[in-house]
């Protein structure tokens, strides 16, 4: 009986050097490594209660069982235990990968019924058709479809700078493409075209299949640690309400901007911003309305600044901005543009427009020694001066404590 490419054959072709492709060794190493990774991922799940790692760990263990089951057919002539179970496990493994990626991409609980339906349907179809010559194409095509769905889900995890999510996407996509090649090889068997192939092609495809599966499993724990690190960084550096830098991160990042400006002998400007009559907004519309107002103002601030400018929420309704490589006249224009954007903008809460305005204090250093904290104190003086002048205005404060104002 002709063996299909999905079956494991320990006999390597004599034209292939044993050092290049020794399939039995590759199968043993792949089985042991996937089992080890599966246990490790289950331990991660036990410690962190991250459901995605439960599914990924089970996927690795299922794949190891599939390899063991497929290998047993060389020694045991019992198709139900070997042929049937191996192919069913091969379909189960990518389904578990997909389930894990869906959990990783979103905190929402995804309904597993569709995956259970696919698995149950595959088991029934395999029981009815596994003796048919086209079954190899059927089950391989189902695995390919699952992997492409997993690749599409992995796209959602791929953000700028997340090299591990991008690697997962590449590996899952390559895995699907390799299985497409595997389907093509199965068709050559049915059409009796196998003589036109290189004699070691099937073994090479199987080897790549095993290697990609193992590499994909190795990426899973990296995803978790990168995501956990990103969450901790966000908690440490960003204000959760406005998604601007918090006070601690403002001074840390500000010192970096300061060092760059000193090294390049560039000017630097600092702004202190306060939302006018914010207490009235909270009293009239509650804290939800106040939070929405702060979010709206923070969005206007981001829109008026350059990408490399630094904005932070450093107090209840107080914001601070650092404009690196910015001269006095430019800083005043930016501040006045921001003031007008708030005063002339339209903020609505429960379909009611709320007029908002801000007061701004600005201080600049064209040359000489910079000190972020001292500049922030000077800008704060300008802010209080703006409030004393009726709010909705901008006041520039110099190191000599002389002031100039731009009113609305």
Image (cartoon, rainbow, N blue to C red):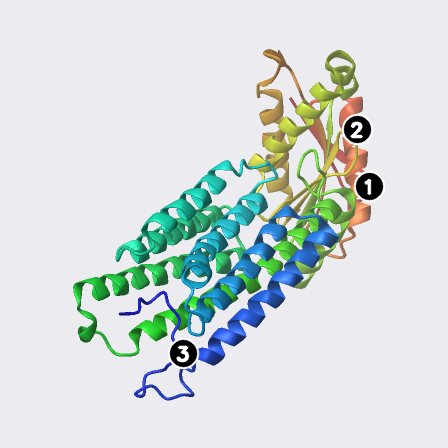
Residue at 66% over, 56% down:
42
Q: Verify CB contact (< 8 Å) between mark 3 and mark 2.
A: no
Compare residues 25 and 87 and report the one nearer the observer: 87
Q: Verify CB contact (< 8 Å) between mark 3 and mark 1.
A: no
* Mark 1 Cα-neighbour bin, 10 Å: few <14, some 14–19, many ≥20: some
* Mark 3 Cα-neighbour bin, 10 Å: few <14, some 14–19, many ≥20: some
Q: CA distance from mark 2 to mark 1?
A: 12 Å
SS for dot 2: helix
Q: Earlier in the sequence, mark 2 or mark 1?
A: 1
Instruction: Name the front one of labels 3 and 1.
Output: 3
Residue found farthest to the front = 77
SS for dot 1: helix
Residue 340 appears left or right of 395: left
Residue 402 % position (x, y):
79, 37
Q: Verify CB contact (< 8 Å) between mark 2 and mark 1.
A: no
Residue at 36% over, 46% down:
125
Disc 2 marks which residue? 385
Compare residues 275 and 155 and report the one nearer the observer: 155
Residue 359 position by quadrant: top right
Residue at 76% over, 41% down:
398
Residue 159 appears left or right of 313: left
Indicate which disc residue 377 carries. Answer: 1
Residue 406 appears left or right of 148: right
Disc 3 marks which residue? 10
Is residue 50 visible in the rendered image? The answer is: yes
Residue 45 appears left or right of 303: right
On the rendered image, what quadrant is the C terminus found in? top right
State whether residue 120 is above or below residue 222: above
State whether residue 212 is above or below residue 119: below
SS for dot 3: loop
Q: Earlier in the sequence, mark 3 or mark 1?
A: 3
């Amino acid at each position: 009986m002709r063996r299909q490419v999905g079956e494991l054959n320990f006999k390597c072709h004599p034209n292939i050097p044993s050092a290049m492709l020794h399939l039995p060794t590759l199968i043993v190493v792949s089985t042991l490594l996937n089992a080890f990774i599966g246990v490790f991922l289950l331990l991660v799940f036990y410690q962190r209660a991250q459901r995605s790692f439960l599914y990924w760990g089970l996927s690795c263990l299922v794949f190891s069982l599939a390899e063991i089951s497929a290998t047993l057919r060389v020694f045991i002539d019992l198709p139900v235990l070997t042929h049937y179970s191996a192919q069913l496990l091969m379909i189960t493994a990518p389904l578990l990968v997909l389930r894990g990626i869906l959990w990783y991409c979103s905190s929402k609980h995804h309904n597993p019924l569709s995956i259970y339906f696919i698995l149950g349907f595959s088991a029934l179809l395999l029981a009815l058709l596994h003796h048919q010559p086209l079954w190899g194409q059927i089950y391989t095509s189902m695995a390919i479809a699952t992997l492409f769905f997993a690749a599409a889900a992995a796209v959602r995890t791929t953000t700028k700078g997340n090299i591990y999510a991008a690697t997962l996407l590449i590996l899952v996509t390559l895995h699907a493409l390799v299985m497409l090649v595997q389907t093509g090889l199965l068709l050559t068997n049915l059409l009796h075209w196998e003589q036109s192939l290189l004699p070691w092609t099937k073994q090479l495809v199987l080897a790549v299949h095993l290697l990609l599966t193992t590499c994909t499993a190795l990426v899973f724990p990296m995803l978790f640690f990168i995501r956990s690190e990103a969450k901790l960084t966000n908690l440490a550096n960003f204000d959760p309400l406005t998604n601007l830098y918090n006070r601690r991160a403002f001074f840390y990042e500000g010192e970096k901007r300061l060092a760059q400006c000193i090294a390049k002998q560039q000017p630097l400007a600092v702004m202190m911003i306060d939302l006018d009559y914010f207490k009235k907004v909270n009293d009239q519309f509650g804290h939800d309305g106040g939070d929405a107002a702060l979010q709206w103002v923070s969005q206007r601030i981001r829109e008026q600044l350059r990408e490399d400018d630094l904005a932070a929420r450093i107090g209840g309704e107080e914001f601070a901005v650092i404009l690196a490589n910015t001269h006095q006249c430019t800083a005043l224009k930016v501040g006045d543009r921001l003031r007008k954007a708030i005063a002339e903008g339209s903020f609505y809460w429960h379909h009611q427009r709320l007029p908002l305005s801000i007061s701004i204090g600005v201080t600049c250093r064209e040359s000489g020694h910079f000190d972020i904290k001292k500049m922030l104190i000077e800008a704060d003086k300008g802010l209080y001066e703006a409030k004393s002048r009726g709010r909705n205005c901008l006041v520039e404060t110099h190191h000599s404590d002389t002031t100039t104002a731009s009113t609305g």
